[in-house]
Amino acid sequence: MASNPILRSTGLFLLVALFICPSESRRVQQITTMSFYLQDLASGRNATVVPVTGISGKNWSFTTFGTIFVMDDLITETPDRNSNQVGRAQGILVASALDGSNVHAQLSFVFSNFNYTGSTLELQGASRQFERYKEISVVSGTGAFRFAKGYAIFETIYYDPRISYSIIRCNVNLLPS
Amino acid sequence: MASNPILRSTGLFLLVALFICPSESRRVQQITTMSFYLQDLASGRNATVVPVTGISGKNWSFTTFGTIFVMDDLITETPDRNSNQVGRAQGILVASALDGSNVHAQLSFVFSNFNYTGSTLELQGASRQFERYKEISVVSGTGAFRFAKGYAIFETIYYDPRISYSIIRCNVNLLPS
Amino acid sequence: MASNPILRSTGLFLLVALFICPSESRRVQQITTMSFYLQDLASGRNATVVPVTGISGKNWSFTTFGTIFVMDDLITETPDRNSNQVGRAQGILVASALDGSNVHAQLSFVFSNFNYTGSTLELQGASRQFERYKEISVVSGTGAFRFAKGYAIFETIYYDPRISYSIIRCNVNLLPS
């Protein structure tokens, strides 16, 4: 499959200079923005997100309170799953809402390409799974991302319900460290 | 039930200006303090904190090493569980001490009221469950709380052992971001 | 057993003044470095790290995707397990890589000695278990370590495969808060 040429020409790591002032004590700063895509398969022998425990006697799913999943999604440069590999999104997801609305996420983005091989971003947050845009916090990082702080916006841009396959755009916004 | 009038008049989000100097490199700053209450039910059909796994053959409890709980506590403005809803405290608790003393917590406070609807605070810490005051770190946040940093003090102010029902005061202290 | 006299004379908490400049917006700063040792036993009745769940029908191990461990390692001042107790390393480890390479860690270092009794450091990261040096992020802390930010480097310096016993050096590097 050919990848989207517009996205390719944009490049993986887009530096966006923004003048922001989140509080009086913080000076004008640049925010770094990165965009990439998670390839997420929730069923079958090659699933990248798998339930490992939950409430006994209940159906383990993202909307069943108590279910815990372990996840290892491929991260790619463009929506095309055969595009350049950026890394892996690894960690746990917890169906943490009694009403099925939210999933608590604890993830490491483990980079394996470009200038970031061996570095990670560390994320924690509550994914509002029925909202279009889900914001998860970037709590820290390692390697090139030591002392990172920021947030990530997730949006599912493709879904195949037959095999529970999703392509998820992730925009990461980082404060200068 | 009538809620405590003194607490009501205080309001949910109390801004306390404190002059602190945690290190020579940090200037005099204001810390923002918020107070609210967790309604925590650990037994029965309507439990808000439920064990989902643990060491095989052992009794799964907060003092049995290895037990993992998923939690979704209602957060209210006052100790009265019928007072204004502030949000939900969602995530996991892990009985992480061989001697039963500590519980490792990974939580999102998901706000649904006042000026904070759609925002979260992200917490991680070791709750010393036999101490009166438990300090858990606020590692970050989303929405209105992006780049947040601080700590939360938890204190159980009411406990009904017949149904394992607790009301827990939570004071959150945030540095300016 | 006598502990290593060279390490003892170094002392637990070694303050290293480093002139660093991670970005133009950050001034010259001092990084605080601490060194200590984790005593890690992964088998037997006295194990300090125990699998509690995983993918049904699979062998639960650090290289089997989906396995979740709960951990409570003794932290000592020197490699000698009978040296001064510094605290405990408590939390969860998740075999989070489909290829078995990485373990996602969520840990609290709970201190019980020296000037840090009652304080914690909070860590999150992806441990590359087949690399010599594993970097995990310090996302925050409590007590004396409130608002902490930094990183920890782990290195296994001793391993007894008969009983799955490891001694792991941990160097923690903290920015001034």
Image: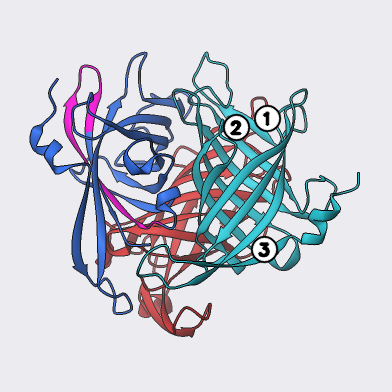
Chain colours: A red, B cyan, C blue
Q: Are marks 2 and 1 in contact (CB under 8 Å)?
A: yes
Task: Kindly tell me whether residue B1 is visible in this rendering.
Answer: yes
Q: CA distance from mark 3 to mark 1?
A: 29 Å
- Please determine if labels 2 and 3 lie on a single subunit: no
Q: CA distance from mark 2 to mark 1?
A: 7 Å
Question: Where's the N terminus of chain B, which quadrant?
Answer: top right
Q: Which residues are magenta?
A: C148-167
Badge 1 element: loop
The residue at the point 59 percent across, 29 percent down is B52
Residue A149 placed where, x, y %?
43, 65
Task: Kindly tell me whether residue A43 is visible in this rendering.
Answer: no
Residue on which disc 2 sits: A54
Residue C153 covered by magenta stretch = yes
- The amino acid type, in three-letter code, at marker 2 is Gly
Q: Which mark is residue A58?
A: 1
Q: What crowding class fits label 2: few (fewer than 14 Cα within 10 Å), some (14-19), or many (20 or more)? A: many
Q: CA distance from mark 2 to mark 3?
A: 26 Å
Q: Which mark is residue B118?
A: 3
